[in-house]
Image (cartoon, rainbow, N blue to C red):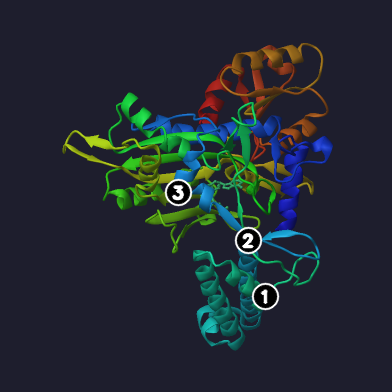
Amino acid sequence: QEDVFKKIVSHCKEYGFVFPSSDIYDGLAAVYDYGQNGVELKNNIKEYWWKSMVLLHENIVGIDSAIFMHPTIWKASGHVDAFNDPLIDNRDSKKRYRADNLIEDQIAKYDEKIDKEVAKARKRFGDAFDESQFRQTNARVMEYQQKRDALHERYTRAMQGPDLAELKQIIIDEEIVDPISGTKNWTDVRQFNLMFSTEMGASADGAMKVYLRPETAQGIFVNYLNVQKTGRMKVPFGIAQIGKAFRNEIVARQFIFRMREFEQMEMQFFVKPGTELDWFANWKQTRMKWHQTLGFGAENYRFHDHEKLAHYANAATDIEFRMPFGFKEVEGIHSRTNFDLSQHEKYCGKQIKYFDPQTNESYTPYVIETSIGVDRMFLSVMCHSYEEEKLDNGETRTVLHLPAALAPVKLAVLPLVKKDGLPEKAREIIDALKFHFNCQYDEKDTIGKRYRRQDAIGTPYCVTVDYDSLKDNTVTLRHRDTMAQERVNIADLNGIIEDKVSI
Ligand code: ATP
């Protein structure tokens, strides 16, 4: 699985999906650029989300707020005081880690040990193996389970404060070693704020410390009144936004899964107090359906309901997707109560309420948030679509089974040879279709090689223009996944393809 992931990362670079930022300067940690195919895929993901939120819901509208915001917003939201991760250094390797990650990895190690015992027993007992009975009776498994549960409980308690000394003590008691130096020479744990800051204003005196937003949500909350009034919105209603967010992540891991500059698609749904848990349940199902509509298989998604809630939330869940490195959060759904709007009321001194014309009452709406990372979504699409497929003739082809609606290029038009009017005929086809969807022209190398190049970027359809095309206006249409070919009229291409590739 690790190997597959490495291959996906290099495929992303080789085929113009994702490059390390500042590549000719050897990159910048946890920052990435999207290439010619990556930007198309990313735009399609955003469009798929935007349409499902803003176009399909009469009561959801979009905004695009600025990245810079008044610094007091981050005080009110709690980010200045509490948007921290616990950090620890190893004195020998000089490497910096998140203390919570080190402990979570240790918890995962107990799980791995248990899995190994279970796998061994399954081999030994074959069909007669009863896993739940084995778990309840095998001494070694029970010992690992006990240790894991005790560690999990102690860790969860320590994170609540958080109690930094206790986090360090856990690392010492568990004898956790630095994966690089192999030593246990740890510093104390300290808090590290994840917000990037800079200065706004020309003179040193007048300069104001501002932050790069660590989430897009606050841009929605501070525009609640503007949008509600100018759009004459009635509760329940939502405001959606897609935009960049910045977090100075201590440890950037797993390619575009955890970046320092990333993009979020967030929707805040304002509801009447008391109805929020029903809406939470509702959005949970709606969002899961959205993911599953892509056709990646229901078994690759799961909810991870939070037991421990942030102080302002009264329900929270993650939608996790099976990445090559395990089930990982792609989207968070949170019932945020009226925390954010009330905090802004306090800090800005203005009333942020909703007047309900039906009941004649005024209240601060409660909020359900759905928040999804574009880049994580991109990664899940890539991981699920990538295949090294063994063909009947013994060859292997690398193919991206992207949902047609998300594919960067929808149709490649390939003249069989570079002469005798075939290129011109191919261009004619592109000229007729390029206003409907993204087409690509390719005349270099054999047809077989050209098909492979399109497979590698996930193009769902290729057409080949040959000598018969000049006579009867037909072409060979080749389907990416089945590699099946059929002869079709040029005039029918738009009808055949557009329906399948539109978002
Ligand atoms: P994590 O626990 O993985 O740090 P989080 O719970 O802090 O994530 P939220 O604050 O709920 O994440 O952000 C909502 C979504 O934004 C996440 O589900 C994820 O898809 C995305 N996201 C958050 N941080 C990053 C990051 N550093 N890089 C890429 N995407 C991110």
Crowdedness of circle 1 by 10 Å Cα count: few (<14), some, many (20+)? some
User: Would you say 294 lies left or right of 482 here?
Assistant: left
**Horizontal and vertical percent position of residue 250:** 67, 53
- What's the distance in space between the residues labelled 1 and 3, CA to CA? 40 Å
* Residue 386: x %, y % from top left: 67, 46
Q: Quadrant of the N terminus?
A: bottom right
Q: Residue at x 64, y 26 (%)?
A: 202
Mark 1 or 3: in front is 1
Q: Which residue is mark 1?
A: 172
Whole-angstrom CA distance, mark 2 to mark 1, is 15 Å
Mark 2 is on which residue type? Answer: Arg
Q: Identify the residue at image location x=58%, y=22%.
A: 493
* Secondary structure of residue under mark 2: strand
The amino acid type, in three-letter code, at marker 1 is Ile
Instruction: Out of 228 and 316, give the one closest to the viewer.
Output: 228
The residue that mark 2 highlights is 190
Q: Which residue is mark 3?
A: 288
Residue 97 percent across, percent down from the top left: 69, 60
Residue at 56% x, 79% y: name it.
145
- Classify residue 466 as left or right of residue 308: right
Q: Amino acid at mark 3?
A: Met
Residue ID at (42%, 57%): 311
